[in-house]
C-alpha cells in the first residue's frame, strides 16, 4: 500500500496523537477505536489488516502496550515511503512515522501523568480525588470494551470464532469472581490454542 503524505499531513498525524494522548485514560490501547477511525477510515493511510496486525504483534511482544503506536507509525511511514520494496528511503519514512506517533502519544500524557500523580499523591485524602478515581474506573472499562469490539468486528466470523467468545466470557467471569492470577489464565489460553481448541 502506498500513500502520499505532505508535511501538513505529518503535522496532522502528530497533533492527532497529541490529542489522543490526553484521552488515553486506560492506556494507549483505549484510544485504538479513534486511531482506527482516523488512520483507516478517514485518512486511508493504513488498511484494516495493517491496523489489527500492528496491535496483535505489539500485544504479543513483551513490553508496554503502547508499542502498537510505534507499529502504527511504522506502517504509516512505510506506506508513505512507497512500501517495503521501495528501498531504504521507505524505512526512513517508517522511522519518521514511529517518532511522530510515539512523541505525540507520550509527551502530553507523560507530562500530565507526572504532574497529576504528584498532586494526587499529596492530596489523596481529598474527597474529590477519591471520587475521581472511582468515577474513572467505568470509563476505562468502557474504552477497553470498545477496543475489544473493534478488534473483533475487524475479523468477525461467529461460526468459526464461537470458542473464542466462550473462552473470553469464561475468563471474564473467573477474573471477576476469583483471585486467580492472570498468568495462569494466559497459560491456559495458550494451551487451548496449541491444542487447536480455540
Image (cartoon, rainbow, N blue to C red):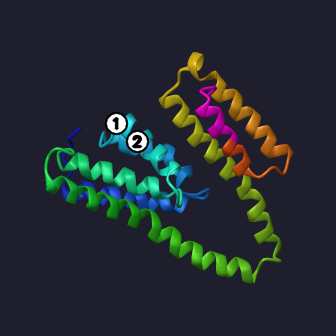
| Residue 179 visible in the displayed image | yes
Q: Are marks 1 and 2 in contact (CB under 8 Å)?
A: yes
Q: Name the residue under label 2.
A: 51
- Tell me which residue sits at (39%, 57%) in the image: 70
Q: Nearer the viewer, residue 161 or 2?
A: 161
Magenta part, dominant SS: helix
Is 72 above or below relative to 21?
above
Q: Classify the position of the N terminus by image quarter.
A: top left
Q: What element carries label 2?
A: helix
Left or right, 40 with respect to 112, comes to left
The residue range painted magenta reads: 188-198
Above or below residue 65? Residue 121 is below
Q: In which quarter of the image is the C terminus?
A: top right
* Residue 106 left/right relative to 118: left
> What numbered label is drawn on residue 28?
none
**10 Å neighbourhood of mark 1: few (<14), some, or many (≥20)?**
some
Mark seen at residue 47 = 1
Percent coordinates x, y for residue 97 in the rendering:
30, 57
> In the displayed structure, would residue 157 be above or below residue 97?
above
Residue at 44% x, 39% y: name it: 52
Q: Where is residue 13 in the image (x, y as percent from the top left)?
A: 33, 56
Would you say 153 lies left or right of 89 here? right
Amino acid at each position: 500500500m502506498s500513500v502520499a503524505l505532505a508535511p501538513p499531513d505529518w503535522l496532522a498525524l502528530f497533533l492527532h496523537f497529541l490529542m489522543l494522548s490526553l484521552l488515553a485514560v486506560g492506556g494507549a490501547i483505549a484510544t485504538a477505536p479513534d486511531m482506527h477511525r482516523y488512520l483507516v477510515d478517514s485518512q486511508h493511510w493504513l488498511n484494516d489488516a495493517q491496523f489489527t496486525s500492528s496491535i496483535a504483534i505489539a500485544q504479543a511482544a513483551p513490553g508496554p502496550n503502547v508499542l502498537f503506536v510505534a507499529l502504527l507509525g511504522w506502517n504509516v511511514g512505510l506506506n508513505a515511503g512507497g512500501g517495503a520494496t521501495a528501498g531504504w528511503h521507505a524505512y526512513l519514512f517508517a522511522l519518521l512515522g514511529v517518532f511522530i506517533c510515539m512523541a505525540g502519544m507520550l509527551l502530553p500524557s507523560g507530562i500530565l501523568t507526572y504532574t497529576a500523580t504528584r498532586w494526587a499523591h499529596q492530596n489523596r485524602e481529598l474527597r474529590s480525588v477519591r471520587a475521581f478515581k472511582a468515577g474513572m474506573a467505568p470509563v476505562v472499562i468502557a474504552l477497553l470494551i470498545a477496543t475489544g469490539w473493534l478488534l473483533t468486528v475487524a475479523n468477525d466470523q461467529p461460526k468459526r470464532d464461537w470458542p473464542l467468545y466462550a473462552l473470553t466470557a469464561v475468563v471474564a467471569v473467573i477474573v471477576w469472581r476469583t483471585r486467580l492470577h492472570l498468568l495462569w489464565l494466559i497459560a491456559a489460553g495458550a494451551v487451548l490454542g496449541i491444542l487447536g481448541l480455540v
